[in-house]
Amino acid sequence: MRRVIMLLLDGGGDRPSGGGPTPLYAAHKPNLDRLAAAGSCGILDPIAPGIRPGSDTAHLSIFGYDPYRYYTGRGAFEALGAGIELRPGDVAFRTNLATVDENNVVVDRRAGRHVSPEEASEVERLVNEVIAPTVMGKLGVEVVYKSTVEHRGVLVMRGPVSHRVSNTDPHKVGEPILEARPLDGSREGNITAEALNMVTRLFSERARELGINAARREKGLPPINAILARGGGYMPSIEPITRRYGVRAAAIAGVALIRGVARAVGMDVYTAPGLNGTASDEYAHALRLAMDLLAGYDLIFLHVKGTDSAGHDGNYDLKRTVVERLDRALSEYMDRLEGMYVMVTSDHATPVSVREHTGDPVPILVYGPDVVRDEVDRFSELTCWRGALMRIRGMDIMPIASSYLGLSEKFGE
Ligand code: ZN
Ligand code: ZN
């Protein structure tokens, strides 16, 4: 039974600031180092050398899909991650519930960062049951809103629509809500901008009547009276990973965007207790689930977000600790990994000195029964470049996995 487990340390790569060791190098991680010592290491350009990836584009690439062809804005992946069914051609925006004054000037882009699940479902009802029918009647565009976390949500449009419209979110307080404009001359662009402006306007008008706002006033919370949209993207038509690479794949991830990218390429998506997409995540349940899922899949992908969060916070010790926590959770399964393939890498570097994604290459290791054992015995940016994999790209990972699994098709005769 050939199987691949892929562990992805989001933003796990780093830079040797001031010549010191990177968090990955410094981390006490005997299990990851054992896998590195027994297998092949190398470095990976998640997209291409020097390209500074978003997590979404890098994941597409690592799942074997050219992001320059399939990436159409974050909205569609975010909506998929929120559990909305999308059809090719649907357009999705990321949204914030916000507070505006009587002149439509944004006072708080996140409505006090406090939106309870009950408030969120009342907003869903307002958009889906009151506003959406009006937009459908006037423009023939179907509108669906779904709240995700706190003030965040996604707005999906279906019909004669295009993602080529500008944001309504001004991204700053003290500025008015923007009018959506078509970014090209297309009829669909015009209709979409009109639909988005209609949702925005009707929302501000109707939100005043929402019962939740009276209650919020009493609690001293700013009212929820605006919806701000950004990052429109359309759902591309994507050949599922099972067909393209012959691989039955499942993803375990707590981050909506990553869940969305995995769903977009046809992976089955799972969550695990303790895996919430934060730096304090615990990986024991997620790893157990990964082991259980091996019975029904060829490849299990496990997303570790904490390294990226710590990188954005500029927190060296925390980034090292996240790696150590994963490694400790891994120790219980080292015996079971024998005879399986394990790949460990990152979707990009988020160096603690930069606090943002950079275009640096990241380390990768491939461990497995018939993988060449090279001389690298420590998994890190400072060591893996000497390994047998040398330097590869994100798009190379799935063909390599599929080949070890014995599932790839021969090219030529
Ligand atoms: Zn990332
Ligand atoms: Zn990040």
Image (cartoon, rainbow, N blue to C red):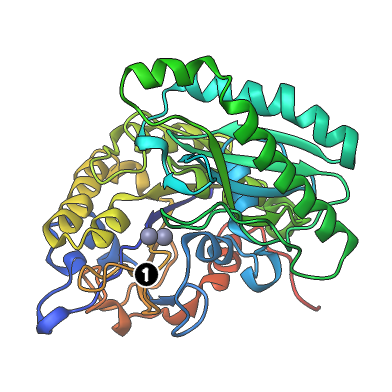
Q: Residue at x 47, y 61 (%)?
A: 55
Which of the 4 image quarters holds residue 24? Answer: bottom left
Instruction: Name the secondary structure under disc 1.
Output: loop
**Residue 382 x/y as whole percent:** 22, 79
Q: Is residue 204 above or below residue 341?
A: above
- Ligand 2, by image quadrant, is bottom left
**Residue 276 x/y as whole percent:** 36, 37
Q: Residue at x 29, y 35 (%)?
A: 284
Question: What is the tally of numbered marks visible in this picture?
Answer: 1
Q: Is residue 381 above or below residue 286?
A: below
Q: Residue at x 50, y 49 (%)?
A: 258
How many neighbours does mark 1 have within 10 angstroms: few (below 14), some (14-19), or many (20 or more)?
many
Q: Residue at x 90, y 60 (%)?
A: 187
Which of the 4 image quarters holds residue 272? Answer: top left
161 on left or right of 331: right
Q: Which quarter of the rendering shows the N terminus?
A: top right
261 on left or right of 303: right
177 on left or right of 234: left
Label 1 is placed on what type of residue? His
**Residue 197 x/y as whole percent:** 71, 47
Residue 3 visible (yes or no): no
Pick the front one: 244 or 402: 244
Q: Residue furthest front?
A: 102
Pick the front one: 159 or 337: 159
| Mark 1: C-beta under 8 Å from nearest atom of ligand 2 | yes
Q: Which quarter of the rendering shows the C terminus?
A: bottom right
Residue 185 visible (yes or no): yes
126 on left or right of 189: left
**Residue under pointer 1:** 357
**Residue 308 x/y as whole percent:** 32, 58
